[in-house]
Amino acid sequence: MIPSKVEETLPELAPFVHAVQGRRRDDGTWCEAWTVRDVLIHQTGNAEELARVLRAFHAGAPVETRGFDRETPFRRMSDSELWATFLNRCEQLTEVAAAAEQDLAPDTEVMWTGRSVTVPFFAEHMREELILHRWDLTGDDRTAVQALNEPWMTEHSVVSVGRPLLEKGRSGLELGPDGRVEGRLRTPGMDDVVVSADAGGGSIRLAAPEGPATIESDAAVRVLLLWGRRPADPNRWHSSAGPETLRRVRALLGGY
């Protein structure tokens, strides 16, 4: 039973919970290196760290964001202990977010993984994590596609997460001093997502549609591509960019 206040703040928690409960913990997922248990460990770490950073800032004693080694203690837990801890950390995040939003202006800047975000980011980012990693469990079912199609998912991925999504792919491309890759991801009726990278770094932004698109798709597929995922049905995206450009842009979209 999810408390009503938690469900109001994290409406995507219940669908994620149901997806986990319908699977064995050692089942594989669409995230190729992770089982269902690994996804749950990652989500527990996400909820704990989001709450820890926001709580510390709210208390006037900011802390730096820890790396993914924060997940190590959860790997030693039994399945039942891990499950209880995950739900507890989601509840704690809800309480911390509510207190911060009551006391701080929405545009108050807080440091998260080396970049500045605002107070509403913390609950919203957990919502995105619940949507994305539920897809890792279920693939393209109706609930996943509807959630991924929400415009705020694209905006959060581009504006609030942004460049870290490109770093894995950019480093893998081994761009030389003059090397550059750029692509436009288009969803009809929405701004394009423009991604680029060179030896100096990567950039990602929303821009009005202009010229040919590198990849055109529905909004759900575009979010999956930004996070280094692939829809089960490749007919949901289209491209006339040619194989070399398409290969480089898709390589850039390596996600985490």
Image (cartoon, grey):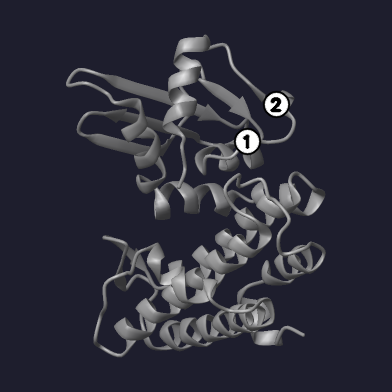
Observer-nearest residue: 188 or 129?
Answer: 129
Viewer can see residue 123: yes
Q: Secondary structure at mark 1?
A: loop
Q: Is residue 45 left or right of residue 109?
A: right
Residue at image coords 53%, 86%: 92
Crowding at mark 1 (Cα within 10 Å: few <14, some 14-19, many 20+): some
Find residue 83 and report its image quarter.
bottom right
Q: Are marks 2 and 1 in contact (CB under 8 Å)?
A: yes
Which disc, if any, is residue 49? none
Direction from residue 108 to residue 185 in the image, left or right: right
Q: Residue at x 64, y 51 (%)?
A: 150
Quadrant, the N terminus: bottom right
Q: Residue 201 vs residue 141: left or right?
A: left
The residue where tag 2 is placed is 234
Q: Between marks 2 and 1, how big is the CA–CA gap?
A: 8 Å
Specify the quadrant of the image occupied by residue 128.
Answer: bottom right
Q: Say what amino acid the circle numbered 1 marks.
A: Arg
Question: Is residue 120 visible in the rendered structure shown here?
Answer: no
Element type at marker 2? helix
Q: Nearer the viewer, residue 5 or 38?
A: 38
Label 2: how many Cα within 10 Å (few below 14, some 14–19, many 20+): few
Residue that carries the numbered disc 1 in the rendered image = 230
Q: How many marks?
A: 2
Image coords of residue 236 (percent x, y): 71, 28
Residue 252 lies, with reference to residue 49, above or below; the image says above
Q: For this rendering, which residue is in front, 193 or 27?
A: 27
What amino acid is at disc 2? Pro
Q: Quadrant of residue 110?
A: bottom left
